[in-house]
Structures are given as C-alpha cells and as structure tokens.
Amino acid sequence: MLNNDFPRAHKDDFYVLLAGASGLVGSQVLKTLLNQCHLGGVYTLNRRPLPHQHPRLVQIVDSHLSAIPDYIKGHVRYGVIALGTTLKQAGSKDALKKVDVDLVVDIAKQMQSMGVTHIAVVSSYGANPKSHSHYLCCKGVMEHKLMNIGFEHLVILRPGPLKGEREQPRPNELWLQKSMKILQHFFIGNLKNFVPIDAQDVAQALLKTLLAPHSSSVSILNSIDMKKLLRKCDE
C-alpha cells in the first residue's frame, strides 16, 4: 500500500529504498535523508505507517517492492537496510535468524532487482559466521550472503552499543550504556569499539560512505572508523 504519489525523477536527484525506518538507526537515516537537497525521494518499507509526512517520502506498508512504480526503478541506485532484532524480541534462535539473515538478504535481493547498485546494511561489532554467539553468528552469515549478491558497493556498519531512544527500550542495552560511562575511560585500541555510539552518528557515517565514490566493492566500518570519518568531515 502506497501512502502518496512519488515525484518524477530528475537527472540530478537520487532515490533511496530504506528498510527499517522505524528502528533506532533507520529513523535517523530517514531524518538525515529528508534534509538532503538533491534527494529525489525515499521509499520506506514498513510493517506499519510511520508518523512522518513529507513530500519526498513514500511509505510502502505491508507490501512488496513490486508496488513501486516502474518509472522510478531505473533511478533507485541506493538502498539501506537497518533491520534487526534480539533473541528476547524474536522468541527463539530460529525466529532471530529469519529476521537478521533471511529477511535482510531477501530484501537486499529485491532491491538489486529494482536497480539498486549501492547498498548499506547495519550489522554489529563482532559479527562473525563462526561466532559462538548466535546473534553475532547471524550477523556474520548475513554479511557474507550480501557480499555474494554482487552489488557495486556494499557498506557494512558494525557499531558497538548504540545510544538513542527506541520505541521499545532494550534493558540490556540501557544497562550497558550506563556501565560504559565509567569503563570507557579505561578502553584503548579496539576496545574503544565498545564505547556506545549515538545512532545519529551511525546514520551520518552510513550515508557519507554510501553516497561517496569508492574504488572497493565492500566497505566495513566499526564504531572507531565511523567516529574518525565524522571528525574528518568536520575539519
């Protein structure tokens, strides 16, 4: 179901497909995108309507990417997937895998069929298909599957603990944020990736990397990389 008509493409505009716009990082990606002057528009894939109204925003609710009009397909070059769940929310390991692996990969393939050539996905620090953690294993498997799809440019964001307000707060995440306020002063090297990072910073780093020219086919950024990128952009 489309909630409004989408503007016709202009040669200087760029269009984005966004899955996960109601999430912590996804909502910040959407907010940032809608402030871009050369944005032609954003298509969001939602389970339920978002509380947003914008002339360059089209929400696809309980629908398939095939609902997007044909005239826009050749202009959608960028895709963003900010989907994810937890074992507690999913209810079982199999249910978590269906979201963090199967759903993400399925949407990525659909985006590619729409003409998306550059895509960014939010993963997690420590993602590894051989991890003993089911959550991190799923993230690692998902990353490898996306690498094999064949996008011109795949951006993988691996943030550590996230800061920001969720629709459904995660107690473990809140506890970790409070603990890190004290412990972060003792972290050095890669341990700094465990210092909580603001979801808005992840969104900014995601878009700066996704929309910039790149010679490599895969870009992987952890929290340290994201913070360095944003500092460099501010100089």
Image (spheres, rainbow, N blue to C red):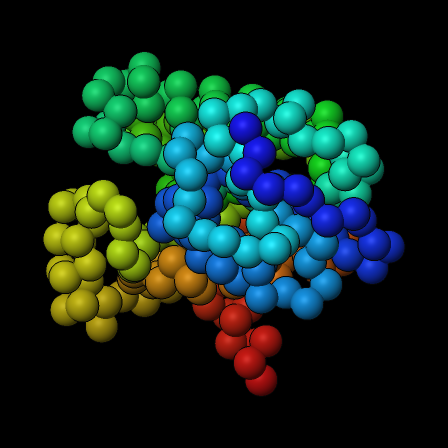
Viewer-proximal residue among 116 and 135:
116
* Above or below for 190 versus 96: below
Residue 6 shown left or right of residue 227 in the figure: right
At 13% from the left and 53% from the top, the residue drawn is 175
Q: Quick check: can you spot residue 175?
A: yes
At 14% from the left and 61% from the top, the residue drawn is 178
At 47% from the left and 25% from the top, the residue drawn is 62
Q: Furthest-front residue in view?
A: 4
Q: Position of residue 142 (x, y in %)?
A: 49, 28
Residue 94 shown left or right of residue 152 in the figure: left
Viewer-proximal residue among 18 and 66:
66
Q: Position of residue 31 (x, y in %)?
A: 49, 59
Viewer-proximal residue among 5 and 190:
5
Task: Look at the image and tell me in which quarter the C terminus lies.
Answer: bottom right
Residue 172 shown left or right of residue 19 in the figure: left
Q: Furthest-top residue in view?
A: 94
Q: Position of residue 129 (x, y in %)?
A: 43, 27
Q: Quick check: can you spot residue 217?
A: no
Viewer-proximal residue among 235 and 18:
18
At 80% from the left and 49% from the top, the residue drawn is 9
Task: Look at the image and tell me in which quarter the N terminus lies.
Answer: top right
* Quarter of the rendering containing residue 77: top right
Residue 86 shown left or right of residue 190 in the figure: left
* Quarter of the rendering containing residue 156: top right
Q: Position of residue 114 (x, y in %)?
A: 73, 30
Count of all numbered marks drawn on residues in the image: 0
